[in-house]
Image (cartoon, helix red, strand yellow):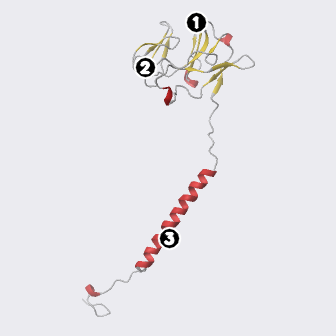
Amino acid sequence: MNSNDGKPPTQRRLRLPLSRRQFCLGCAWGSVAAGLAGTAYATGRFLAPRVLYEPPAIFRAGRPEDYPMGTVSEAYKEQERVWLVRRPQGLYALVAVCTHLGCTPNWIEGEGLFKCPCHGSVFTPEGDVVAGPAPEPLYRAPLTLDPDGRLVVGTGVLGIRLPGQANRTPRREGPEYVVKA
């Protein structure tokens, strides 16, 4: 079958809208434009402020007199993941996160122990491991008194440990962890 130019279809040249040179130049300039756009985006992200709008990492837990001797308060267990424990050595805040896999243990009043329902770890009211797979005692949250005499519990880094502290005993004593009241 012949076309209008008189040549068979196998010998006809295809006419493209762009030449090879125009296509390569377009690809090159497109690559330059993409690189400049990426650089401009990275520069803009660097100059824009990165602010975390998070709730404060502390909460007020009333006065020391609100917690009778020998009790464990579960008032902040659900919302703040902290128990307030009053013992003869003072008042302290235990983090309600099992050190095994991060489950939330339960306070068993009749036995006087914290028990993890998932894997069976058992802790004393001081946070020490009695049984189970938990490798470390429960962490303590920083606890201080404000000028008005109210308890201020720090919840910024509950249960988080820096890599250099991996094999150290967690800090549990001291004025920032036990309020003598």
Q: Which residue is mark 2?
A: 135
Q: Nearer the viewer, residue 168 or 143?
A: 168
Q: Nearer the viewer, residue 3 or 59?
A: 59
Q: Which residue is mark 3?
A: 29
Tell me the kind of residue under disc 1.
Answer: Gly
Residue 119 coordinates in the image, percent (x, y): 39, 20
State the mark number for residue 24.
none
Q: Residue at x 75, y 18 (%)?
A: 148
- C-alpha span from label 1 to label 3: 75 Å
The answer to whether 29 is drawn above or below residue 83 in the figure is below
- C-alpha span from label 3 to label 2: 59 Å
Depth-wise, is mark 1 or mark 2 nearer the camera?
A: 2
Q: Is residue 165 left or right of residue 63?
A: left
Residue 44 coordinates in the image, percent (x, y): 61, 54
State yes or no: discs 1 and 3 in contact (Cβ < 8 Å): no
Q: Residue at x 63, y 11 (%)?
A: 67
Disc 2 crowd rating (10 Å Cα; few below 14, some 14-19, many 20+) is: few
Depth-wise, is mark 1 or mark 3 nearer the camera?
A: 3
State the mark number for residue 70.
1
SS class, disc 2:
loop
Q: Earlier in the sequence, mark 1 or mark 2?
A: 1
Tell me the kind of residue under disc 3.
Answer: Trp
